[in-house]
Image (tube, coloured by chain):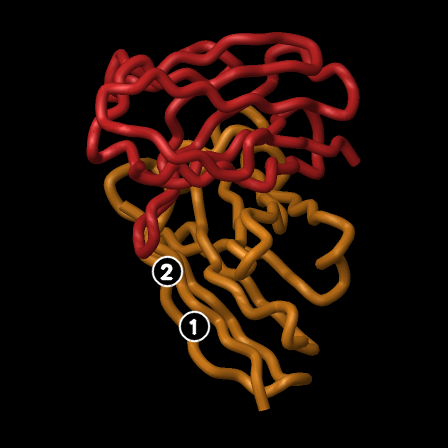
Chain colours: A orange, B red
Amino acid sequence: QLVESGGGLVKPGGSVRLSCAASGFSFNDAWMTWVRLLPGKGLEWIGRIKNKGDGGAADYSSPVKGRFTISRDDSRSTLYLQIDSLRTDDTAVYYCATVRGAGTFDYWGQGALVTVSS
Amino acid sequence: DIQMTQSPSSLSASVGDRVAITCRASRPISTYLNWYQWKPGKAPHLLIFAASSVRRGVPSRFSGSGSGTDFTLTISSLQPEDFATYYCQQSYNAPYTFGQGTKVEIK
């Protein structure tokens, strides 16, 4: 099970940190990803983070690189997404998911809505 | 980046109809193609991976085909719970891009 939290209404230029609490599987071994659903535009891949055994590195899509940071705390079985310098076009539902292989997204959370507005 | 183009963007169908959704990649991706179902307020759900492998627990009325650049998701007999938006996604290389979605509505 994956449960996102931390969404809400944020002003442009602000920051938000989303959490994704995992249970029911070995989080330590999992690669994890974030995907967002943009209103009227569909799904957009944000990035992924490998497990520590595979190096633990994160990689990102070009549109979010530099403003978005994915991290993980294996001791808490929790995935994070830090978003800085928020813009109105970051308004979306943010989903975390497990990764099968390198780029197949197996199990998803219910999503966290982030609304960026003044 | 690899661009994914779905068609149609929406369709109206009746319960029992056979429905086909196509997805085209901007360059060959072998069979690195997944299909997801999304309903408002719910988590997206992986249906098909590797172009034609049906995920465990997914009803057998769902099937996938194709390789290279052209792919198809077929629902053999549409059921009430299948009215949703469907997305294709390439897992060939990062960034992992999605199609724009196909909304299946009740006729």
The crowd level at tag 1 (other Cα within 10 Å; few <14, some 14-19, many 20+) is: some
Q: Which residue is mark 2?
A: A4
Quarter the N terminus of chain B occupies: top right
Choose top left, top right, bottom left or bottom right for residue B48.
top left
Q: Which residue is mark 1?
A: A7
Residue A41 at x, y = what percent? 59, 53
Q: Is residue A30 visible?
A: no
Marks 2/1 same chain? yes
Judge left or right: residue A86 versus residue A8: right
Choose top left, top right, bottom left or bottom right for residue B47.
top left
Residue ID at (75%, 56%)? A63
Residue B86 at x, y = what percent? 44, 35
Q: Look at the numbered disc 1 and give the secondary structure of its residue.
A: loop
**In this picture, is B18 found above or below B47?**
above
Q: Are marks 2 and 1 in contact (CB under 8 Å)?
A: yes
Residue B102 at x, y = what percent? 49, 37
Q: Amino acid at mark 1?
A: Gly
